[in-house]
Image (cartoon, rainbow, N blue to C red):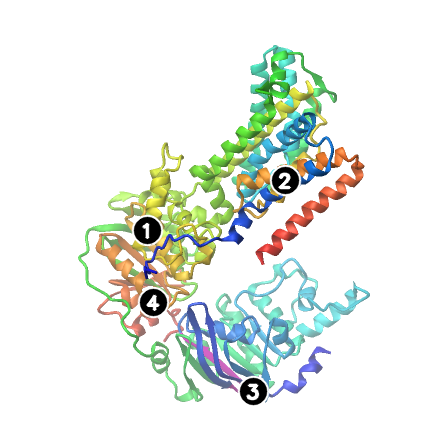
Amino acid sequence: MTTQNNVLPTARKPLDLRALLDNWAMLLAAVSIFLLCALLIDNFLSPLNMRGLGLAISTVGIAACTMLFCLASGHFDLSVGSVIACAGVVAAIVMRDTDSVMLGIGAALLMGLIVGLINGIVIAKLRVNALITTLATMQIVRGLAYIFANGKAVGVSQDQFFIFGNGQLLGVPVPILITIVCFVFFGWLLNYTTYGRNTMAIGGNPEAALLAGVNVDRTKILIFAVHGVIGALAGVILASRMTSGQPMIGQGFELTVISACVLGGVSLSGGVGMIRHVIAGVLILAIIENAMNLKNIDTFYQYVIRGSILLLAVVIDRMKQR
Amino acid sequence: MHAQLQTHNAGARLSFTGIGKTFPGVKALDGISFTAQPGQVHALMGENGAGKSTLLKILGGAYIPSSGTLQIGEQTMAFKCAADSIASGVAVIHQELHLVPEMTVAENLFLGHLPSRFGVVNRGLLRKQALACLKGLADEIDPQEKLGRLSLGQRQLVEIAKALSRGAHVIAFDEPTSSLSAREIDRLMAIITRLRDEGKVVLYVSHRMEEVFRICDAVTVFKDGRYVRTFEDMSTLTHDQLVTCMVGRDIQDIYDYRPREHGEVALKVDGLLGPGLREPVSFQVHKGEILGLFGLVGAGRTELFRLLSGLERTTAGQLELCGQTLQLRSPRDAITAGVLLCPEDRKKEGIIPLASVAENINISARGAHSTFGWLLRDGWEKGNADQQIRAMKVKTPNAAQKIMYLSGGNQQKAILGRWLSMPMKVLLLDEPTRGIDIGAKAEIYQIIHNLAASGIAVIVVSSDLMEVMGISDRILVLCEGAMRGEQRREHATESNLLQLALPRGLAN
């Protein structure tokens, strides 16, 4: 053994099992649950069911990518469910009136951007609590969705629009592809850009971030603006799958997205979060829901089970930190 | 009921025997032994960081001493929490009062044991008990009033009334007059005198000489966490004796001061006013100079730094950096200009605890080293972190270690590394060695010297007189939000700096 007692030993520890588990536990859990379901439940692995599972993951998965940024910065966003509904409605109406798919999608994304900007500016500049701000915009946007749609679903007749929801590439549905792209892109954004790193710093210690020269307000506004746009994108895809913009869709969706993130290991108090947490959380929630449907478990019981899993996950997380 | 439980402690003296308190890397208290007699007001004096507050925290049950015993009368006390201390008849009146502004005076007085029946508060009884409590202390206070509407002096009286209602026999005051008006001070003095005459043990922590000579019967002096001596006879004690005793012994030269060449003016502050400053502040600091800023707690040092680092907006005055006017709207402006701050409260304002050492070092400089300003360059990120860790001698297993697991000294060195990754003109250090062990202190002084030698202007705020005198070329003294004087290194003595730092009119 050499006695290299340098200040900076980059020597790797033999095998840090604990750190390994901490980092990958939830993803491992997701894979285990998947395998368990594959073994125990008939038809779970059938192409039809896999496709359904993938589609179920897609909407939550896309929105969870940017919710990760909100949570990592120490905030969260309740308005995303309403944004999804309103984006579908706006896209459908604009397409109906202009017959242009591009304009429809553009208008929907613009709507998401505006909602996100409002959230971000109110939270960052006026220093209003994110819970209250997004609770308010959640209701406003939901109301607007109903007003725009006149209270009922707005049908879409442009065939090109359906590519986003029902198209396939090499046998894989487009929504799943978009979700994978989002996972990769936002995971990269969080780790390899100043924007992502600043987001983590703000959530970790806002005062220290400010004093270190991070433009805290601008970063926060950006986080919410991007979240608005991505929420709207998820709404457009959902509308495409359903061939209509429905103002009543996505009620409680925001809580599902936050649950998925937290279940995967993203901290509600900010500063902790990785894209693999999000992927794990989204997978676990979707697989369990899918399994429960295949097993014909009553919806009422499904609520109880989903809630219990979330509670169990956060309690375990708490105990781990002690 | 409460009062009866404690009667056996009444008339008992309070003694500390060999009390020590160690925090990771720091000895806050070491072998403190003295006795405070009932029917006396006993002052505790010493510079900031001498250990007075730590001792009061031990008395109040907030800290458990690492060694030694605390006795009330013949009984040895082992307080595990604040409730133990209160139950034994001890009350500590802190600078920041532990009261709820949104609740009424009466509710505050009986918080935790409101008179109730089956959980329903008996409002009539509460009011009656509250009135009885306040009687003779502050008869003018209406128990129904919201606490937040009272003046600070009145709130303090509520806190005292609360302590007495719980049958406190030992009452400790921590800088009780720091935010009171002259009238309120007189009233507090009268009350303290009364408590003394009732045979209670009163501990009194204050920087204000005048008050100590006015009401105290004995003074115990602390320095660097150690007991220096107790003066039992106030009539033969002089101000000078007391100050000399507080300043005390020499310490070995860990500062390693070397004279340097000073260049032209780096930062010129002209008539600066803002939150926390009572009078306009003007001074200059030169390239290569280390300027010390000394003052007691509340002198406005940190506030001045908040203005210089762009955290607070100035209300008047001008800043000039290397001959050019400097406008600061946010910390970013200051950082861009090269005015960099190492904040006082490392945990709260300095580090991002959950992030790695590398993150904490790179966060400020990376914008300039990223592709298009936002795409991180892996090579630079790793290289810079490693380089700063090596240069600052940060002791960490690797750059990916979460910074929260490092000691205070290593966290401070990492933050210095953060700023050394940037182009720097002026470095503002706020209490750079607070809570840091002696070895790391010496390393940090070394770094400060090297920075100054490379032509950077360094301003160091410290409440540690030895440190200020040890490293500074020139020392400015602040007191109560105003500049009180300046001493060159060769003329600075502990007593002349302390005289300047003590509130005017009280020192002489």
Q: Secondary structure at mark 4?
A: helix
Residue sticking out furthest to the top: A99
**Mark 4 belongs to chain:** B
Numbered tag placed on residue A260 in the rendering: 2
Give the residue pinned by disc 1. Answer: B388
Query: What amino acid is labelled 1 in the image?
Result: Gln
Q: Is residue B296 left or right of residue A294?
A: left
Q: Which residue is mark 3?
A: B13
Asked if marks 4 and 3 fall on the same chain, the answer is: yes
Image quarter hosting the C terminus of chain B: bottom left
Name which quarter of the figure residue B462 lies in.
bottom left
- Most common secondary structure along the magenta stretch: strand
Is-magenta flag for residue A170? no
The answer to whether residue B206 is left or right of residue B501 is: right
Q: Are marks 3 and 2 on the same chain?
A: no
Determine whether label 2 and label 4 are within 8 Å by CB. Answer: no
Q: CA distance from mark 1 to mark 3?
A: 54 Å
- Nearest to N terminus: mark 1 or mark 4: 1
- The residue type indicated by label 4 comes to Gly
